[in-house]
Amino acid sequence: MALGMQLIPRIARRLSRLTLVLLCVALVSFGLMMASPVDPVDAYLGPQMAQVSPEQRALIAERWGFDAPPAVQFGHWLRQLVSGDLGWSHVYNQPVSEVIGQRFQRSIMLLGSAWLLAALLGFSLGVAAGAKEGSTLDNLISTYAYITASTPAFWLAIVAVLLFSVTLGWAPTCCAGPTGVLNQDVTLASRLHHLLLPVITLALLGIANITLHTRARMLELMRSEVATHAFAQGASRFDIAWRHGLRHASLPAITLAFASLGELFGGSILIEQVFAYPGLGQATVAAGLRSDIPLLLGIALFTALFVSVGNMIADSLYSAIDPRMTSGGL
Amino acid sequence: MLTINRLSLQLPLYVSWWKREWATCLNEFSLTFCSGEVHGVVGASGAGKSLLAYAIMGLLPTAARLNGQLAYQGKPLDEARQRQLRGRELALIPQSLNALDPLARTKRQVAWAAQRAGQSSRHALQSAQRALDHYQLDARAQQAYAHELSGGMARRVLTAMAHVSQARLVIADEPTVGLDPLQRQRVLDALRGLADQGKTVILITHDLRHALPIADRVTIMRDGQQVETASARAFHGSGASLASAYARALWLALPDNGFLSHAVSQAQPTEQEITVA
């Protein structure tokens, strides 16, 4: 009962903090857009820019509300947001919420599978490497992790396309499905085939990070008095890794996995660009390059929400696993 | 039961990153422990008491240089046999309370110890329950995490973990540190109880007073060497029946014997605590 009483204010506090974070994100992104040298009307017109008279340009600007001072524009956007309207994307000529919805559906497949792969594989590799410091397995895994951790995502993606798509022809070079086929006609197998390479490339980076942190925690444990005591009880290395190691190493792994959602999002922007995968990342680039303020603000807000929720989950999971966090121990 | 014959132990000491010297931590140490006895091993910090325990258990760092023989029940106790007997025949109650896993509940950890001694998982939970009951840890303490236990409770949990293994040789490394007199007495009584069941208990402590009430024999250690092994009864009066000056000095330095601490410093030559070989 007492727990429930504590829970409600805690949730309320979290939510109000989240609202504040989102507001700040919106304000900063809006400020950045205002400072951007790309003129939204020019970007919209593209090559036809020269054929449009200044009067027509002013008309377009007025129609989209670009003539008003920034503060008024922001206030206008905020009012709309409160009523549930994210605005109109002039790049895709669709409501922003629809663009985000469609794009996110594709991105979440990419992000979700890459994230899951990175978390599970990274954790297992980290535990295996950290169980015996300096073993052949440890050396192999660490070397691999250090190399991938210092490899730029986009470079890896380009090499992957070059090798697996162009040279070997194992994977498609672009898009979420075969070209010329309607979205609803694409088979599941084909979808997965198109996802394969981007997912692996995106996951590789996350794996390295989680592996290294999990390994470090495992080494710490294997040198600790807990491990010595377990050895004294006749436990094998595997026993210690299984009974003690999994618990101890899951703490940094979980925190890192959820906290790295932001990085994953950033990585997906580059990866989607290289693989021409029509997800949220690609929409972000398009919105930025063509000054689609409502879309960019919408995506920024959505991403911030996504990452904040991830951090919140990490926080609560951490206290669920480590008893010292809940009962006011350490 | 356990015979130690001329055991020498050296650990590397890096004077600088290229220069390594060997610190002698045990020097030609010989001793026999018998079944059913509590054998107190007493010495100052750095005398090599804990390393002796680790040498018996086979838990020394890989860099250690070990010479001499160990024999358990008449057969040589080498590395392979140590690995086989650890947790089944040989048990260690560690000095540090940090040896408890902070992320697992008390009862579960004790059950792990039982499983490692070869019990099935169901049987292990039952014997964990029994052992914890035996050491007067209630249901709440059994479901608690290490940080929720008091020092005395944690100490008893560690003792229970050695208890469930049903080992015949139990080494207790400084089990009385940080305990109030009542808690201390409980822990010492528990150890005496193990010996009365016919087990061998090696009680490592820096405080002679804690060893004497329950020990049958006491070995005094200094600088990795055995100074004297005497019956606990030899420690009485002016200590006239003790052979070595150092043992007598330790005895006379106790508060009950008038704090004759100058005797200790006289008996202790000015040489370094660790002899560098």
Image: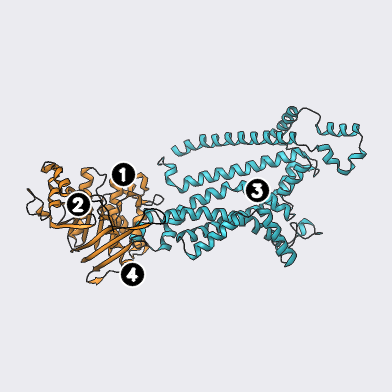
Residue type highlighted by circle 1: Ser
Q: Is residue A184 above or below residue A83?
A: below
Q: Chain of mark 2?
A: B
Q: Chain of mark 1?
A: B
Q: CA distance from mark 2 to mark 3?
A: 61 Å
Decide if residue A132 is on the left or right side of residue A305.
Answer: left
Q: Colour of chain B?
A: orange
Q: Nearer the viewer, mark 1 or mark 4?
A: 4
Q: CA distance from mark 2 to mark 1?
A: 19 Å
Q: Colour of chain A?
A: cyan
Q: Residues within 10 Å of mark 4 (few under 14, many from 20)?
A: few
**Mark 3 sits on what residue?**
A265
Q: Which mark is residue B80?
A: 4
SS type, badge 3? helix
The x, y position of residue A55, in whole percent, is: 91, 31
Q: Check if mark 2 and mark 1 are on a common chain.
A: yes
**Mark 1 sits on what residue?**
B150
Q: Chain of mark 4?
A: B
* Residue occupying the point 11% across, 43% down: B257
* Residue occupying the point 86% across, 43% down: A46
